[in-house]
Image (cartoon, coloured by chain):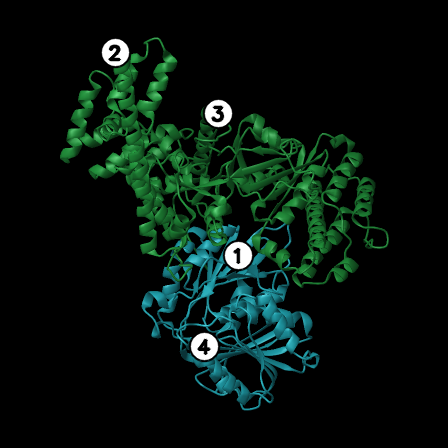
Amino acid sequence: MWNLVSKHSRFGIIAESYKSENDPIDSDYQVAIFFSGYESRGLVSSSLLLPKSCDISIIVYFREKDSAGLRDKYDPLLLGHVTTCSKSNPLLIEGSSISEIDEILKQIIEKIPLSSYSSKHKWFIDTSVSPKPYFLGLLGYLRQKVQRPKLTLFNATAYYEKCLEQEEAFSFTEGLEKYMWVPWLCGNPDPRLPWTYFFLLGFEGDRSYGTYERYEPQFVKALISDPGYRDNYPAEVRKRNQQFMEEACPEIIYADAADAVQAWIEIDKCLQVGQDKTNVCIVPLGPKPHAIGGALSALNDGFPGVLYLMPSSYKVRDVPRGDYIWKYDITL
Amino acid sequence: MEECNPKQNPFFFGKFEQEKRLNLYVPDSIVEWVSEMPILFEGVRGSGKSSVLNLLTWQAAWKKSSLKTMGSSRALHVLSDPKHIGVSHRVEDMDVAIWDRWQIINNTRQCYFATFLEFLYLDLLLDALINIRMITKTLFVNSSIENEFTKILLDECYPPGMRPNLRDLSFHSLREVISENHQGIRQLMTNNVSENDIRRTYSIVAPGSVIKKFGNGFRKCYPELSKWVILILLDDCNFLREWQIQVVNTAVSNCSSPISYKLSSLTGLYPTFETLDETKPLVLDNISRKPLPTNYSFGPGNQMPKQNNKQVYLRFLNHVCTARLEQYDKETLTENFDFKTLLGKFNLEDLLTKKLSVSENQKAITLLVKAKEEAGNGPLSITRTWLHEKNVRDRTQYMEDKKSIDETDKKGKRHIASIYERKFNHVAGVSLCRELGLDFPYYGYDVVMHLSSGSIREMLRIMYYIWEKASVKKKFFLNNQPLDQKIQTAGIMAASEQRFKMIDANPFSDKKVSLQSICERLGDLFAHCQSYPYILAVPETAAIAIKEIELEPRIQEIIRKAQISGWLLTRKEKNDDLWIGLHPILSPKFGISFRNPFYYPQRISGDQVRGLFLGDDMEAKSTQQAILSQRMRRCESRYQKKISLQKKTALLFDIDQD
């Protein structure tokens, strides 16, 4: 049974987070969006949605494939599951690179009929293996284009060490990064104000430090996952972000790694406290639920921007699901 | 909410410095900076470019509560009795990326970028006037003049038919509309609107036109302030694209009194000096490229006289350190901090002599004995003896040349001293220490200046670690007592190691190469070049030279990222060469000479650059070996030529004798 864990509302946005071990997703959706990936946890949501519960389904197949055969293994499975839970054949988006964010988002939007842009319709997005700018960008898009859209975002937690040596387990990206605003979450900065950078910390401490060092914001805040997907993860985050913590001296807050709504609550609370007005930049480097929480905070206010560090490539690894699955029912 | 406790170290170089009430040093150059001359400030990362621009803002002059300043009375007068209004904007590369993604023809994009900038700066200027009025209660208070000024600006910003309705003709009301305007352009651009849609919504203005009108209107409406200068400050111009900087350059070249632009950029990365008019680039007459007070540059190609440079930088460092110590413990600070007194003077030969005297290494003892013999009654020089031993310098030639100089020929003696007694000393010192297994004695104010190389942040990092290592002797900082060599060396080594660890170690290719590994490869290469026998080719090699055209885009991107991060320095030469070296702060880590890296760069090929930057560890190693072999071949070839020349000379002599 799905257990309601957190609930919050602000500026007309309502969100509830639910947790389960393995319950089916017992709702109908007019639009459902899935993403291909190297990880088996990318198949979880489509196997839990009820048959023919989605009017229109879209699967995004990124152009990049791996030599280990993971995509070849999981792509057909994903197609099979999604076909089962859809009323019609899934619409496929193929051939674009994972880094062509604008292009892929454009293609997703083009596939959605105008009739779906209704407050009566519900959207489903699986975030488990989707790079952050995709589901975050869609949140921003829907908030702008649809009146009171209702959506469910799904995330399967992860068990990182199950597939790799300890050191490699906590590294997900490669290459020189480019910094970009998430589409539709570019914020509305006031040129008169200084900046607060809100880091949603993950395991890749060099990215947190590199971003801090690059932008030198006047104010720094950080959200650490605690509890994490596993008991040892919060300590791992602290250890890997030590250099960042020592130099940036952030104000630190905590939220459950898997609870997007709790993250939203804590980020909002932290931003409302004390200091002079600043521009806010949210930097989601941690778990996807925290990124969702950060985006909800950004959508609240209209001012914060969400900054994405686009890597050259993502590491190929098959991360299995963890103990729990989560869904976040959001009305924007 | 948990707060991170900043460490109890006055030289902390992290964010902590930005939160406390800052003690800022105001150099005398501010008098020139607030003039009407457009200026481009160039410097390495951490050299104070943003700080300089911040010093020129209206906030620094009027919002005194947030800033404590130090400097000469002449400099402080500029802030205490300001005759300038400066407004600043920092370029953010993620915003530049949005402009890039906007799918629209370049001309239109440039027009709207120009409009965006004009409205953004007008927003900031109006905000400045409003705030200055609130603070002074005397300036800009006349409402009818305010209305007149607002009308002038409205006419410039909006053509008839597109004029917005204002609540009233106040700065506040105009500012609200202007602010909506530039934010609106940004929103439309991020949503990738078409050209038609944006033209329907916002009209365009020419680069610099609105700000120029502001300046003219300011003078007309406030004739009593006709001597005032309006400073348009743009930070981090290196992040702008060429098409964007052309807009900025156009604005700079079209501006007129009282407007003045002050720009900042990482050295060598200002995108272009072209304007929108190809026939009229921004030339030196239009803009002055000014060194910062931290521009202690050291060596080849420096514009300022070396001594002057050093004194200015030293004064600056003194003030920064004093400001930090005052903040830390004003009560115990006995007098103004003196960098030179605390750290002492670096005397290479004295330090090496002491090291060798206490060494148990037989080679070290032998070298010391030989040096003493060679010195005779003259000054002892360990490095000179070592260089002679290794045939880096020709001892015989040295003696002959020395004898040939007349005692009264001061210029000649200086020349001999330069080429024989001072040249290569630093690298010799580093090399012989490595060879003898000794720690090189990093010590002295001039060493710290070299290592920081124009970056205040690096200087603070070094001082931070020296403070940490000082332990019970921390009070020496506050009492201006000299700090011993071991503590300084330990602190400097720790700073260098820490700086290295800061470099991104995340691999960016399947060959497991990272920026940090590239740094290590370069450092290792230079360490070898500065060791025997490779030192015979050309001493003090701490850079590579490559034709820029041979650098593939991927490597260019890596170099740019490393430059922005601050650990890699580059220099463009006239023959399309690019010289690449490490920031001197990394020299102790790799045991190489800590001076400017660009004395004797090692030329390498495009393939070799690829091997070092993109190859796996084995490829990089074999590339390094190839480069070193190249050096030895060059050295041998030169030696052969020398022998051959000597033979020919001898033959000639014999013939002459005959």
Task: Name the foreground residue: B35 vs B656.
Answer: B656
Residue type marked 3: Pro
Q: What residue is shown with label 3? A: B305
Labels 3, 2: front one: 2
Labels 4, 3: front one: 4
Q: Are marks 1 and 3 in contact (CB under 8 Å)?
A: no
In the picture, residue B321 is in which quadrant? Answer: top left
Task: Tell me, by letter, which chain the rendering colours cyan.
Answer: A
Q: What residue is shown with label 4? A: A71
Residue type marked 4: Arg
Count of marks overlaid on the render:
4
Labels 2, 4: front one: 2
| Residue B600, horizontal then vertical, whole percent | 39, 35
Q: Specify whether disc 1 shares its chain with disc 4.
A: yes
Q: Specify whether disc 3 shares its chain with disc 2.
A: yes
Q: Earlier in the sequence, mark 3 or mark 2?
A: 3
Q: Is residue B310 left or right of residue B212?
A: left
Q: CA distance from mark 2 to mark 4?
A: 88 Å
What is the secondary structure assignment of the residue under circle 2?
Answer: loop
| Residue A110, horizontal then vertical, whole percent | 66, 75
Residue B658 is tagged as 2
What is the secondary structure assignment of the residue under circle 1?
Answer: strand
